[in-house]
Structure formats: C-alpha cells, structure tokens
Image (cartoon, grey):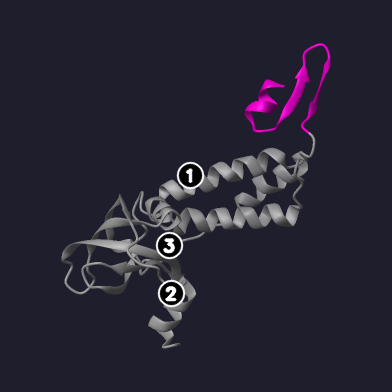
C-alpha cells in the first residue's frame, strides 16, 4: 500500500479494514503493442545520438519504465531487436550537442526566462556571450538549432547547438511576447509573411 501511495496512486482505508482507490481515480492503460515498443526502441537510438547526455538519460529513464510494464515476451523481443539497430556517425556529421545544453534550454522555454549563452561563431570561431530569449528548438539538415531573440542584436538569431559552449539560466523574464516558433521559422527561412 505504501509503495502504491509513493508512486502517486491515491489509496484510502486502514489496515485490517480494507483499502480502495479514491473515487474517480482510474489507472491508465499500460499495455503496449510490440510495434509500439519497437518504435520506442528506435526513438531511443535516435535520442542517444542526436541529443545531449542529460536528455538521453531522462529518455532512458522513461524507457526503463516502458520496459517494466511490457509482457516478458515483448521484453525479449526488445532485448534481441536492440542488437539489430545501429546509428553510425558520418565523419562529416555536424558536432554533437554539448552536454547539459538541451535541458536548460527547455526549462527556459517552459518558464519564459532569459538565458546567458556562450557561443562559438561559425564564420570566425569567435566566442561571444549573448543574453537571449529562446523561442524554440528545432532540427534541420541533420543538426539541432535554437531560435531566440538576441538582446545584443535586438533581433531573432539562430544558434547551432553544436557550437554552444555553455548555457546559464537567469531569473529575468522575457521582455516581450513573441510569435510562435512555426511562424518565426516560416518568416526567417521561407520568407512567409
């Protein structure tokens, strides 16, 4: 009973008299098909190669929970199929996302807080420090990018996550309301109005 309560399931009652779930609470279905489980495995492989270590660790933790609720036959299928999927890095591949970059960016997006970004420019390799208001993270042409309002340039800028050296979150809220990411990408990359 204590384990159920600690996992967030509202149980009422007393020892010796009986227990029940609180009225209205229903356990969500936790059954996955083999095809769903295999798609999670494929996603895990992609996440392991296309995100930073902290994000992968969180995804892996979620995958362990998925594995825990699988039928033993599906667990065996996943275990055996895992050896059949590989993602190789091309020697011309863009630099990987540095460690501990994606999570602070996602928290900044969630909380609408500015971040201090240490960044190495592509054209001259100069290291700059920017205070930005992230508007979104997107994957394009084999690389992750962040689109952000740059306080230094007073305009939107795109930063390649492989060239981010460091990210520090601040308590400073965004200074303005920005358009949705899709509109910004359309305007910046495709001249959509």
**Observer-nearest residue: 151 or 59?**
151
Residue linked to disc 1: 57
Task: Find the distance from the CA under tag 2 to the CA under tag 1.
Answer: 24 Å
**Observer-nearest residue: 76 or 184?**
184
Task: Find the distance from the CA under tag 3 to the CA under tag 2.
Answer: 14 Å
- Is residue 160 positioned above or below 76 on the image? below
**Callout 1: 10 Å neighbours few (<14), some, many (20+)?**
few
In this picture, residue 129 sits left or right of residue 38: left
**Callout 3: 10 Å neighbours few (<14), some, many (20+)?**
few
Horizontal and vertical percent position of residue 149: 32, 69
Q: Which residues are magenta?
A: 1-22
Q: Earlier in the sequence, mark 3 or mark 1?
A: 1
Horizontal and vertical percent position of residue 164: 29, 59
Is 3 contained in the magenta span?
A: yes
> Residue 21's quadrant in the figure?
top right
Residue linked to disc 2: 141
Residue linked to disc 3: 89
Picture residue at 54% right of the left edge, 55% below the top = 45
> Residue 131's quadrant in the figure?
bottom left
In the displayed orientation, state which residue is furthest to the front. 176
In the displayed orientation, state which residue is furthest to the top. 16
Q: In which quadrant is the C terminus drawn?
A: bottom left
């Amino acid at each position: 009973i204590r384990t159920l309560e600690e996992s967030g399931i509202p149980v009422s009652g007393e020892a010796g008299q009986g227990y029940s779930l609180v009225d209205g609470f229903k356990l969500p279905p936790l059954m996955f098909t083999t095809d769903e489980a295999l798609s999670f495995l494929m996603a895990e492989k992609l996440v392991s190669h296309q995100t930073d270590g902290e994000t992968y660790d969180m995804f892996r933790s979620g995958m362990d929970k998925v594995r825990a609720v699988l039928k033993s036959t599906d667990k065996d299928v996943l275990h055996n199929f895992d050896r059949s999927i590989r993602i190789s890095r091309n020697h011309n591949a863009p630099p990987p996302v540095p460690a501990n970059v994606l999570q602070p960016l996602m928290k900044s997006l969630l909380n609408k807080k500015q971040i201090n970004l240490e960044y190495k420019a592509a054209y001259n390799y100069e290291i700059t420090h920017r205070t930005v208001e992230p508007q979104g993270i997107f994957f394009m042409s084999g690389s992750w990018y962040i689109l952000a309002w740059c306080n230094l340039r007073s305009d939107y800028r795109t930063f390649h996550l492989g060239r981010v050296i460091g990210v520090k979150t601040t308590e400073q809220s965004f200074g303005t309301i920005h358009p949705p990411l899709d509109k910004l990408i359309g305007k910046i990359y495709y001249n959509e109005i």
